[in-house]
Image: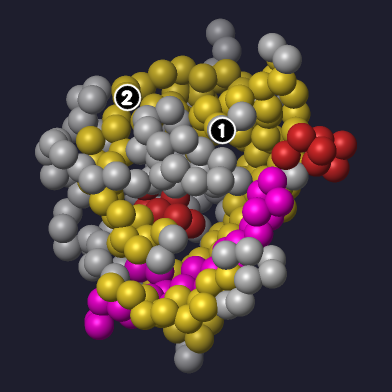
């Protein structure tokens, strides 16, 4: 579901993410899809409670190609009584500079209904937003300031896969900006090193480990509670995400991958 929701201002650290915001895609391609199982920590055990997928489609407008990121997540119906989730996120992004042009969000989380549609205009540094913050609430239009280096939460997932982690030391922070809830937020990703990770039915992988600073919202507490593991190869596929939530803790573990751009060289072969 919401995997990298980030906020709070960056106080210190090296400036490792260029202020020009120029990012080149070297990790994913059209047609990629990654599926996850969501686990909830219930009565001392981890229980499979839902699933989520992320996929990269292509879109064309005025003969120009765009990335179309699409994600849907939901709890299994038998656990809806605990905390029902039905989420849908999508983003359209320029291929050449990886800047988003439109973000759409339709969520139902524990009875909280939110619908948002953002149009990004980086030449004017403005975002045109349409929001409904409750099932019975009216839609509200707005025009708000957009920082040059801001990304919505979907596009930031794919931008983060293309950041350079190779020269970092544990504890280094990469500044980022997230546009969420009608405004831009300064934040960072903290690098936590390299760690081997076993994934059921898929094997063992060498992974880059980091922690994003979270936005407090309908599910998450603010802070550094989330830990993310991505493959230490050219794909940078998120393999495991662990985080406390307002009621307990959850984790998302990959169960299927297709359409990857490169071989999974991070897989550790058994002797």
Task: Give the percent coordinates (x, y) of residue 247.
Answer: 61, 29
Residue placed furthest toward the bottom: 62
- Report the side of 125 relative to 29 (left or right): left
> Looking at the image, which residue is at 26% across and 51% down?
186
Task: Give the percent coordinates (x, y) of residue 176.
Answer: 27, 50
- Of badges 1 and 2, nearer the viewer stands 1
> Looking at the image, which residue is at 41% across and 37% down?
222
Q: Is residue 109 magenta?
A: yes
> Looking at the image, which residue is at 25% across and 67% down?
147
Which residue is tagged 2? 192
Q: Secondary structure at mark 2?
A: strand
> Quarter-wise, where is residue 269 in the image?
top right
Seen in the picture, residue 256 relative to 196 is either above or below; the reply is: below
Q: Residues within 10 Å of mark 1 (few under 14, many from 20)?
A: few
> Looking at the image, which residue is at 63% across and 64% down?
134
- Report the side of 12 relative to 38 (left or right): left
> Quarter-wise, where is residue 270 in the image?
top right
Q: Secondary structure at mark 1?
A: loop
Residue placed furthest toward the front: 137
**Which quadrant would the C terminus be assigned to in this image?**
top right
Which residue is tagged 1? 246
Task: Give the percent coordinates (x, y) of residue 28.
Answer: 47, 53
- Report the side of 177 relative to 30 (left or right): left
Q: Main secondary structure of the magenta part?
A: strand
What span is colored magenta in the figure? 98-126
């Amino acid at each position: 579901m919401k995997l990298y929701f980030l906020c709070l201002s960056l106080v210190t650290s090296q400036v490792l993410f260029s202020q020009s915001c120029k990012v080149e895609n070297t990790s994913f391609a059209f047609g990629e899809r990654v599926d996850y199982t969501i686990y909830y920590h219930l009565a001392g055990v981890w229980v499979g409670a839902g699933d989520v997928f992320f996929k990269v489609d292509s879109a064309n407008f005025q003969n120009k190609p765009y990335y179309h990121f699409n994600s849907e997540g939901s709890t299994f119906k038998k656990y809806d009584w605990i905390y029902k989730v039905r989420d849908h996120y999508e983003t359209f992004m320029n291929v050449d500079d990886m800047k988003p042009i439109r973000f759409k969000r339709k969520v139902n989380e524990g009875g909280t209904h939110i619908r948002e549609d953002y149009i990004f205009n980086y030449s004017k540094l403005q975002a045109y937003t349409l929001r409904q913050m409750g099932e019975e609430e009216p839609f509200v239009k707005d025009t708000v300031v957009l920082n040059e280096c801001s990304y919505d939460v979907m596009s930031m997932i794919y931008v983060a896969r293309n950041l350079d982690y190779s020269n970092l030391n544990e504890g280094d922070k990469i500044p980022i900006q997230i546009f969420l809830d009608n405004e831009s937020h300064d934040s960072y990703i903290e690098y936590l090193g390299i760690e081997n990770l076993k994934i059921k039915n898929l094997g063992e992988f060498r992974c880059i480990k980091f922690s994003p600073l979270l936005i407090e919202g309908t599910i998450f507490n603010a802070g550094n509670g989330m830990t993310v593991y991505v493959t230490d190869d050219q794909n940078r596929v998120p393999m495991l995400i662990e985080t406390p939530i307002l009621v307990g803790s959850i984790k998302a573990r990959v169960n299927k991958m297709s359409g990857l751009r490169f071989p999974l060289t991070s897989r550790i072969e058994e002797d």
